[in-house]
Amino acid sequence: MSLSLGARFVNASSNALRKIGGSLDNLGAKLEVAKYTERLVPSTRFVAVNGIAPTVSKQAAFIAPSANVIGNVNVGNQSSIWYGATVRGDVNTVTIGNNTNVGDRAVVHVAKIQGDLPTVIGDDVTIEAGAIIHACVIESKSIIGSNAQVLDGAVVASNCIVGPGSVISPGTKLESGYYYSGIPATKTRALTEAEIASITSSAKDTAELALEHAWECSKDYKQVVDDEENYEDAMGRDDEIYSKDAGVDADVLDQGAPGMIFDTTLSRPDRINELQGK
């Protein structure tokens, strides 16, 4: 009898706690400034600072699930922010133009204490993995190499390439049409016509790739499971005997529509040696 009463008490208590938890969750959702939709990877974060939330174009190519976009940030059309990257407009503004990509683990930040400096990034810009872009201006059609740094007050002119690992010192103004490298970075050589053309094509190629990643990352659990099942089915299917594309009216060995079970020793005893060798 006491066990029954105890079970009923635990059940009633758990229901009450569940309701309280749901109420607190709803309250927290109402207090959020920047709304987000939880996907399979719930680490995506658009964070508001001082009541200012990021503004991302509806035509943005891709914001990775593990990227962080914080504060007064504006992201333009067909632009992408890749895995592990952080764009932080907490003490000033960050503006990212169209068809621009911020690579994996790159950091884009601003300045306030050492000068009131925003970060402005133009169109068709490629910022490669691990780069640091801090309180500077990067004009349209330029490439910042992997792990390079562009520091406070610097200006990277259009049609420039900054080599991997290079450091653009604070206040430096780069001249258009050149390749810069070193620590601190210096003018190395003039860019060829092919290299200048590759700046725009690189940005375009990355934007197209970003659309594929955006599609995959937008899938819910059911779509992921369906993809896995279809892949396993395709890998195990013998196209010479049956095809899933034949439709629901197809019939194999008088056993109905095609399925994974047909490629077994039960359905094909005449192929037992071959199938057991798989």
Image (cartoon, rainbow, N blue to C red):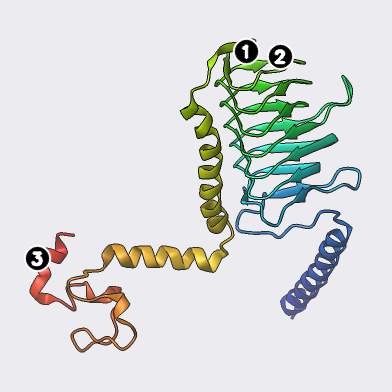
Q: Position of residue 185 (x, y in %)?
A: 62, 12
Question: Measuring 63% from the left and 49% from the top, which residue is drawn there?
Answer: 78
- Helix, strand or loop status at disc 3: helix
Label 3 sits on what residue type?
Asn
Between 203 and 157, which is closer to the camera in this rendering?
A: 157
Residue under label 2, please give it: 169
Report if the CB atoms under discs 3 and 1 are less than 8 Å apart: no
Report if the CB atoms under discs 2 and 1 are less than 8 Å apart: yes
Does residue 241 sit above or below 21 in this rendering? below
Residue under label 3, please give it: 273
The tag earlier along the polypeptide, 2 or 1, is: 2
Label 1 sits on what residue type?
Ala
Q: CA distance from mark 3 to mark 1?
A: 66 Å
Label 2 sits on what residue type?
Ser
Residue under label 1, please give it: 185
Q: Nearer the viewer, mark 3 or mark 2?
A: 2
Q: Position of residue 212 (x, y in %)?
A: 51, 54
